[in-house]
């Protein structure tokens, strides 16, 4: 069954005729062409699909569209532009904090939610925020350094 759902994604309103029970991730990727959030586990356990919903990092793989119809949704594509990257995006590049890049969007989104609440997180607080993210590339120390770098830049 389809219904017209209004979504506000990256500052733009969208009217979509879709199944309200469809996972948000599928709508973002297939209907809106926003490919940064990735399908990983489908069980809200890996972090690859994280997006911001009203400023909170939320796994989009199992979040039904109807649950976010009136929310302000931000994906990685909404954080910066190629000409004007967000400080987190710049820091991840500078620290070479990604190898394959599959989990990077979710990591940056989660870091954004953390830094929006705390611009001076300790290493332990960063690790706690990223606890549910699965990354097998081995860049964990670089990821933490990137978040610390971005925090310093954003605090200025």
Image (cartoon, rainbow, N blue to C red):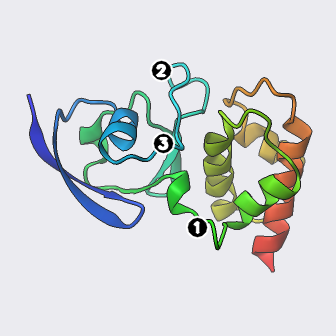
Quadrant location of the C terminus?
Answer: bottom right
Q: Residue at x 40, y 27 (%)?
A: 62
x, y percent for residue 116: 64, 63
Q: From what the image shows, is residue 64 above or below residue 74?
A: above
- Badge 2 local density, few (<14 within 10 Å), some, or many (20+)? some
Mark 2 highlights which residue? 42
Q: CA distance from mark 3 to mark 1?
A: 15 Å
Q: Residue at x 68, y 41 (%)?
A: 104
Q: Earlier in the sequence, mark 2 or mark 3?
A: 3
**Quarter residue 118 falls in:** bottom right
In the foreground, 122 or 105: 105
Mark seen at residue 35 = 3
Mark 2 or mark 1, whichever is nearer to me: 1
User: With 20 as the anchor, is 139 left or right in this view?
Assistant: right
x, y percent for residue 94: 86, 58
Number of numbered discs on residues: 3
Mark 2 or mark 3, whichever is nearer to me: 3
Mark 1, secondary structure of its residue: loop
- For residue 123, say whether it is visible: yes
Q: Earlier in the sequence, mark 3 or mark 1?
A: 3
x, y percent for residue 120: 81, 63
Q: Residue at x 84, y 53 (%)?
A: 146
- Badge 1 local density, few (<14 within 10 Å), some, or many (20+)? few
Quadrant location of the N terminus?
Answer: top left
User: With 99 as the anchor, is 64 left or right in this view?
Assistant: left
Mark seen at residue 81 = 1
- For residue 147, say whether it is visible: no
User: With 138 as the anchor, is 98 left or right in this view?
Assistant: left
Mark 3, secondary structure of its residue: loop
Q: Earlier in the sequence, mark 2 or mark 1?
A: 2
């Amino acid at each position: 069954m389809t219904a017209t759902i209004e979504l506000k994604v990256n500052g733009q309103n969208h009217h979509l005729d879709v199944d309200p029970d469809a996972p948000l991730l599928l709508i973002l990727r297939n209907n809106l062409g926003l490919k940064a959030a990735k399908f990983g586990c489908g069980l809200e356990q890996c972090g690859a699909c994280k997006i911001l919903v009203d400023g909170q990092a939320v796994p989009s793989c199992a979040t039904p569209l109807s649950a976010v119809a009136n929310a302000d949704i931000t994906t990685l594509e909404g954080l910066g532009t190629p000409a004007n990257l967000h400080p987190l995006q710049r820091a991840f590049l500078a620290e070479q904090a990604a190898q394959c890049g599959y989990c990077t969007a979710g990591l940056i989104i989660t870091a954004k939610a953390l830094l929006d609440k705390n611009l001076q997180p300790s290493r332990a607080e960063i690790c706690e925020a990223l606890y549910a993210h699965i990354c097998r590339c081995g860049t964990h120390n670089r990821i933490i350094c990137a978040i610390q770098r971005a925090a310093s830049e954003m605090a200025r």
